[in-house]
Image (tube, rainbow, N blue to C red):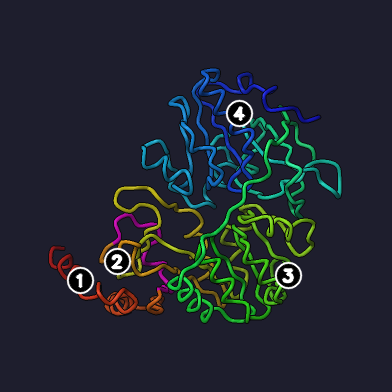
C-alpha cells in the first residue's frame, strides 16, 4: 500500500458511534493522523467516539477537543493533565500490566488503532520505530482496524518489526516524530539523584521513568560499571551511560548485553542511538511490566517518583488537591518486582516540598496508588528512608527524618492528631 496525504483520507467509513480509537503513545504518537481525526470530529463528520491515549507530549490535544470525543487514558500525563483539570478525561486507574492484559483479552476493546510506522530493513514489512506499546497490543486483536502513518524519520529498532499487517489506510507523516526534552535538573534534583546512585550497586539492572530525576540519575551513574537497563521508558541519559561504558547489560539474565525498553522517550540523540543498534531492543508490556519477567532479573532496581508519600510508606502518584495529574502507570508493577528480585530494591524518589513550599511528605496520603505493604526505600534531598521490614513507629521516625526540617514538627503533630481521632 502506498501512503497518501492525510487530506485524502476520511475516518468516517472506519468509525461507528461509541467506537474506541487507540493511538500510539508519547514520541510514537502518529500526530498527522490524530490531527486529521480531530479535525473531522470538529467538522461534525464523525460519530461520537472514544480516544485512548498515553503520555501526550505532542500538543495535538491542546487544541479544542470536541464534545463528541471522549478522551481516555491511564493518567493525567502531559497534555492529558490539562484535560483532566477541565473534566475532559476519563481515567483507567489500572496497572499498566493490567491494561495490557485487558487489551489482549478484549476486556478493553479497540475498534480502530493508529500507529506510526517506518519500513523494516531486515525483512518485508513495517517497524514500530519508537514504541512497542499498548497501541500495538490493541492492534493485534482480530476486530481492530489499523491505520498507519508512514514516518521515515523514525529509527528502525530491533524488536520493532511487525510484518505486513492489513492496513485500512496509510498516510504520509507531515512532521518528524515529536521529541521529549526533560527539564534541566536543579540542585535539589541532583542531590536526590546522587543519593539514589549510592544505593545502586555495580551490575544492577535499572528501571526508571522519565523527567528530571531520571535525567539526573543517569548523570550520577556514569561512574558505575556493568549496569543494565530494562524499562518501560528509555530516556536520553541512557545514551550517556552507554557512551561512558557504565551501561553494558553484561550481568542481566534477561536480554544479556541488550538494553530492553518499551518506548523511546527522548530526543533525536536517543533515536539515533537506537537506530539499528544490536545493543537495544524494543519490547512489549509483557516483557517490560509483567512481574514474572522482571522479578527473575537479579539486582533489579526500580526508580520511580510520586506526588506525595506518607509517614507509613503509602504512595500517592495520581491525585493532589482533587486534580488528576499523575497515573497508576507501571509503578506498582515495578515496586513489587524489584522487591521480589534477588538483590533488588524499589526506590521512590521525590523532592521533600513542592515549588510553593508545601511538604510532599504528609501524615496521610489522600488517594493511595502504592500500599504501605509494598513500601521499600524513599529518597529526598534530605536523606534515605528504608522502610522494608519496619514497623509503623520506626517508619514514621525515618520518614520524618527525610522531610523538610520546617515541616517535621507539623507532620508528627498531624499524625498524632489523626491517631487520636481514629
Q: Which mark is residue 359?
A: 2
Q: Is label 1 in contact with label 3 (beta carbons under 8 Å)?
A: no
Quarter of the picture containing the C terminus is: bottom left
Residue occupying the point 59% across, 57% down: 232
Q: CA distance from mark 3 to mark 2?
A: 41 Å
- Residue indicated by mark 1: 410
Which residue corresponds to the image point at 45% horizontal and 53% vertical from the top-left? Answer: 328
Labels 3 and 2: the sequence-earlier one: 3
Q: Is residue 367 magenta?
A: yes
Q: Measure the alpha-carbon separation of dots 4 and 1.
A: 52 Å
Which is closer to the viewer, label 4 or label 1? 4
- Rounded to the nearest whole Å, what is the CA distance between mark 4 and mark 2? 43 Å
Of circles 1 and 3, which is in front? Answer: 1
**Bounds of the magenta segment:** 365-380
In the image: residue 324, left or right of residue 5: left
Sequence order check: which comes first, mark 4 or mark 2? 4
Determine if the magenta segment contains residue 290: no
Give the secondary structure at mark 3: loop
Q: Position of residue 309 (x, y in %)?
A: 35, 65
* Mark sitting earlier along the chain (4/3): 4
- Count of numbered marks: 4
Marks 1 and 2 in Cβ contact (< 8 Å): yes
x%, y% of residue 224?
63, 80
Above or below for 274 versus 59: below
Provide the residue designation for mark 4: 36
Q: What residue does disc 3 label?
A: 256
Using the image as rendered, state which of residue 285 and residue 180 is in the foreground. 180
Amino acid at each position: 500500500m502506498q501512503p497518501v496525504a492525510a487530506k485524502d483520507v476520511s475516518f468516517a467509513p472506519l468509525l461507528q458511534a461509541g467506537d474506541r480509537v487507540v493511538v500510539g503513545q508519547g514520541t510514537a504518537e502518529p500526530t498527522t493522523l490524530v490531527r486529521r481525526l480531530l479535525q473531522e470530529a470538529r467538522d461534525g463528520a464523525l460519530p461520537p467516539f472514544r480516544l485512548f491515549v498515553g503520555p501526550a507530549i505532542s500538543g495535538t490535544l491542546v487544541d479544542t477537543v470536541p464534545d463528541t470525543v471522549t478522551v481516555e487514558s491511564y493518567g493525567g500525563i502531559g497534555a492529558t493533565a490539562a484535560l483532566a483539570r477541565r473534566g475532559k478525561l476519563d481515567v483507567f486507574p489500572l496497572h499498566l500490566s493490567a491494561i495490557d492484559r485487558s487489551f489482549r483479552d478484549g476486556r478493553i476493546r479497540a475498534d480502530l488503532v493508529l500507529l506510526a510506522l517506518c519500513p523494516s530493513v531486515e525483512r518485508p514489512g513495517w517497524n514500530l520505530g519508537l514504541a512497542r506499546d499498548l497501541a500495538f497490543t490493541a492492534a493485534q486483536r482480530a476486530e481492530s482496524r489499523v491505520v498507519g502513518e508512514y514516518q521515515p524519520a523514525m529509527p528502525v529498532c530491533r524488536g520493532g518489526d511487525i510484518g505486513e499487517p492489513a492496513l485500512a489506510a496509510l498516510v504520509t507523516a507531515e512532521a518528524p516524530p515529536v521529541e521529549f526534552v526533560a527539564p534541566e535538573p536543579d540542585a535539589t534534583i541532583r542531590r536526590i539523584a546522587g543519593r539514589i546512585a549510592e544505593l545502586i550497586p555495580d551490575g544492577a539492572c535499572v528501571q526508571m521513568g522519565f523527567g528530571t530525576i531520571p535525567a539526573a540519575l543517569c548523570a550520577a551513574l556514569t561512574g558505575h560499571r556493568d549496569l543494565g537497563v530494562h524499562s518501560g521508558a528509555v530516556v536520553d541519559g541512557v545514551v550517556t551511560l552507554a557512551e561512558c561504558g557504565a551501561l553494558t547489560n553484561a550481568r542481566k539474565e534477561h536480554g544479556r548485553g541488550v538494553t530492553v525498553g518499551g518506548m523511546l522517550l527522548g530526543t533525536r540523540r536517543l533515536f539515533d542511538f537506537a537506530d539499528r543498534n544490536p545493543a537495544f531492543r524494543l519490547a512489549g508490556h509483557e516483557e517490560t511490566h509483567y512481574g514474572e519477567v522482571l522479578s527473575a532479573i537479579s539486582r533489579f532496581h526500580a526508580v520511580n517518583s510520586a506526588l506525595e508519600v506518607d509517614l507509613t510508606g503509602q504512595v500517592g502518584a495520581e491525585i493532589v488537591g482533587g486534580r488528576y495529574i499523575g497515573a497508576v502507570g507501571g509503578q506498582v508493577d515495578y515496586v513489587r518486582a524489584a522487591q521480589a528480585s534477588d538483590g533488588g530494591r524499589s526506590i521512590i524518589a521525590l523532592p521533600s516540598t513542592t515549588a510553593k513550599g508545601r511538604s510532599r511528605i504528609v501524615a496521610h496520603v489522600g488517594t493511595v496508588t502504592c500500599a504501605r505493604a509494598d513500601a521499600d526505600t524513599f529518597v529526598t534531598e534530605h536523606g534515605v528512608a528504608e522502610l522494608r521490614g519496619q514497623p509503623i513507629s520506626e517508619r514514621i521516625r525515618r520518614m520524618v527524618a527525610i522531610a523538610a526540617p520546617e515541616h517535621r514538627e507539623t507532620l508528627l503533630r498531624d499524625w498524632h492528631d489523626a491517631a487520636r481521632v481514629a
